[in-house]
Image: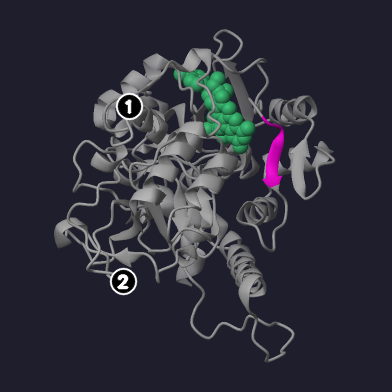
Amino acid sequence: MVPSPIHVVGGGLAGSEAAWQIASRGVPVVIHEMRGPVATPVHKTDKLAELVCSNSFRSDDAETNAVGLLHAEMRLAGSLIMASGDEHQVPAGGALAVDREGFADAVTARLSAHPLVEIRREAVDALPPADWGPTIIATGPLTAPSLARSIAEESGASALAFFDAIAPIVHTDSIDMSVAWFQSRYDKAGPGGTGRDYINCPMDRDQYESFIAAVLAGDKTEFREWEGTPYFDGCLPIEIMAERGPETLRHGPMKPMGLTNAHNPAVKPYAVVQLRQDNALGTLYNMVGFQTKLKYADQVRIFRTIPGLEQAEFARLGGLHRNTYIDAPRLLDGQLRLKSRPQLRFAGQVTGCEGYVESAAVGLLAGRFAAAEALGDPLLPPPPTTAFGALLAHITGGHLSSDDEPGKRSYQPMNINFGLFPPLEAGTKLRPDGFEGRFRGKDKTLAKKRAITARALDDCREWLGMTSSQAAK
Ligand SMILES: Cc1cc2nc3c(=O)[nH]c(=O)nc-3n(C[C@H](O)[C@H](O)[C@H](O)COP(=O)(O)OP(=O)(O)OC[C@H]3O[C@@H](n4cnc5c(N)ncnc54)[C@H](O)[C@@H]3O)c2cc1C
């Protein structure tokens, strides 16, 4: 018997991929896409999967780049977005860039021609009633306001954000711990604290003053007209705080109070940059209070002048954008279902992933989960060692919240990156050629990445062959 249709609200990157995965499993699907009758401030056409800005899917290197690995896993999973991207590739070195018109035309044509796909050009103004059955909400960073209001009513207003205020995130193993040290302010152990919750980077007066001067002089991006300027207390960009006076940051996020430099206890730091543990694995730390509109190149240049961060590798740089997304770790279960109404799933950027490829990947997962459920053989989530699993684990629980700081949302959008993957098991051979010599420096970093991606692709292949009943056998 053919199951009832699954509804997908939003025909962007995530919704198109979700619909394709559902239809490919023999389950009918209805896409509700508002473009046509209703515009968004950034889309220019009514095509499905329109790329609103750059035409790049970023690195296509599946061996040493996390987004390249995600491409590879999506190709293994029969992704429509990747197949259409590959068909309409334009030269871009090691990146996968696409002809945006050809790409969106291809996605639109493949879905329109599929006998199990119906496309309705209409806005969905509220979370659908129970009689719609299983539904995936994939309405993206510019979710229409009426639907956003309905999501806020269901989830609680504090669980829906309209801007991201992103502080940079650093790979823990790139922080120089001979300069920085672990300590919570006043040695307070918060709930679940381990004593490794915060890393501190000390500055003397000269270093602080040069830092403030560099922040003030740095190149900034502007808000676009339709974004407004969403400054509110608690998430002022560091450059705005610095403009308010040279001491403002030293009395705000860079205050040195309650901290003693473990490497030099006799000398009180003039200012301190704190980094807070960001994920349960402890592989990532975010720079507390460092949301910024500085351009990326200047962020890297200026933040690497902070003592202890000279060699910092950034999993994500800071930003402030118009973006609609839910507090997914709190609201969604491990299969992207809304805990309070499990027939609703969320997918794409509205879950707090970031980027075209990540949004499509989360759509792919939501589509597969929904189709498997409709067919009566639910799918196990992908292992966290895969790029799919690492991204899903981040969205649905890997991120640490900051309940100790009321009023501050710490769940912020994130691209896929190696910091989201579990570390390699002890004893993993980094040299597949059997040579016993040790890697050092950059070679070691690359060898580790190769081992992580090889593990991921093996585990992904296995997962793709597996449903819960197969796994139980
Ligand atoms: C200005 C801007 C620039 C960006 N630039 C980049 C970039 O260069 N590279 C990158 O990787 N990422 C970029 N992003 C992020 C990018 O939007 C997402 O990565 C990606 O498009 C998100 O995919 P999605 O499917 O979640 O949302 P979208 O692709 O936006 O799709 C959501 C769809 O839902 C529809 N919709 C919304 N509300 C309703 C409703 N109530 N009823 C029916 N349909 C509805 C919309 O019309 C849209 O088609 C940018 C985002 C913005 C806002």
> Do tag 2 and tag 1 residues touch (Cβ < 8 Å)?
no
Which range is magenta? Answer: 54-58
Percent x, y for residue 32?
53, 21
User: At which x and y percent is residue 463?
Assistant: 56, 63
* Relative to 61, 274 lies left or right: left
The residue tagged with tag 2: helix, strand or loop? loop
Q: Is residue 99 visible?
A: yes
Residue 379 can be seen in this image = no
Q: Which residue is mark 1?
A: 244
The vertical placement of 12 against 446, above or below, is above
When the figure is inspected, residue 251 is found, relative to residue 260, above or below; the finding is above
Residue 263's disc is: 2
The disc label shown at residue 288, or none: none
Q: Position of residue 461 (x, y in %)?
A: 63, 64
Q: Observer-nearest residue: 312 or 224?
A: 312
Q: Residue at x 45, y 46 (%)?
A: 168
Quadrant in the picture for residue 161: top left
Three-letter amino acid code of the residue under disc 2: His
Q: Categorize mark 1 by other alpha carbons within 10 Å: few (<14), some (14-19), many (20+).
A: few
The residue nearer to you, when weighing 449 against 80, is: 449
Residue appearing at x 48%, y 48% in the figure: 303
Ligand 1, by image quadrant, is: top right
Where residue 94 appears, as percent x and y from the top left, is 77, 50
Q: Amino acid at mark 1?
A: Arg
